[in-house]
Amino acid sequence: MTRFAHPQRGVALIASMLILIIITLLGLSSMRSAGLQERMSGNQYDRNVVLEAAEAALREAEAIAAAPLTVTATCSNGVCPRPVAGMADRWSDPDFTGWRAATSTRPELVTSQFIIEDMGPQPVDGTCHLQIPVEPTCLVPLYRVTAQAVATNARGTIVTLQSNIRQ
């Protein structure tokens, strides 16, 4: 009995190669997505740590601003005189050096600092404008407190917070 040889065309090889390519592309896509998610969670972690440090610095500065302050003509120990109209805000000026270092609970992760700016006397309530002349007791000092925290890692996340304090 004679057997006839069937010519093979390599269809199984081509099909298995296509399946292997598809699986490889899916694996690479999953790895890329996992890497992106890891970077996003790292950035979110940095943001949370820096935000907490900025909030702590803001609370520290608010406690200082709630007590009577002595404001001089120049920034001293984080307490600054009234801002000059038309000039850049101190907190946005990269050359400003009047910051006061805040107490940090995580100095290996973040540095934080604050300034307290005298914003001048402000009315105590909504009835001061009805007084003619305005009584001095109707006006109280207003301070703008700015806190800034910066991550010490390579990403350098920065958070700046502000609040106003009346004495």
Image (tube, rainbow, N blue to C red):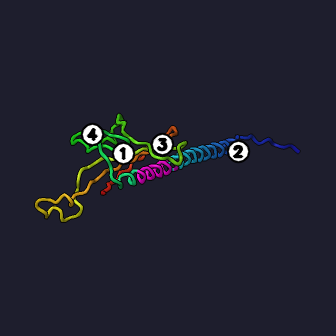
In this picture, residue 22 sits left or right of residue 76: right
**Which badge, 4 or 3, comes first in the chain's sequence?**
4
Q: Dot 2: what SS?
A: helix
Mark 1 vs mark 2, CA separation in Å = 73 Å
Quadrant (top left, top right, bottom left, bottom right) of the N terminus:
top right
Task: Name the mark on residue 115.
Answer: 1
Characterize the local packing of mark 3: few (<14), some (14-19) or many (20 or more) Cα atoms within 10 angstroms. many
Q: Dot 3: what SS?
A: strand
Mark 3 vs mark 2, CA separation in Å = 62 Å
Amino acid tagged 4: Ala
Callout 1–callout 3 Cβ contact below 8 Å: no
Location of mark 4 (residue): 73
Where are the magenta residues, as a range?
A: 45-60
Amino acid tagged 2: Ala
Q: Residue at x 55, y 42 (%)?
A: 108
Most common SS among magenta residues: helix
Q: Residue at x 50, y 49 (%)?
A: 49
For marks 2 and 4, give the one nearer the viewer: 4
Is 56 one of the magenta-colored residues?
yes
Task: Name the mark on residue 12.
Answer: 2
Quadrant (top left, top right, bottom left, bottom right) of the C terminus:
bottom left
For marks 4 and 3, give the one nearer the viewer: 4
In this picture, residue 104 sits left or right of residue 138: right
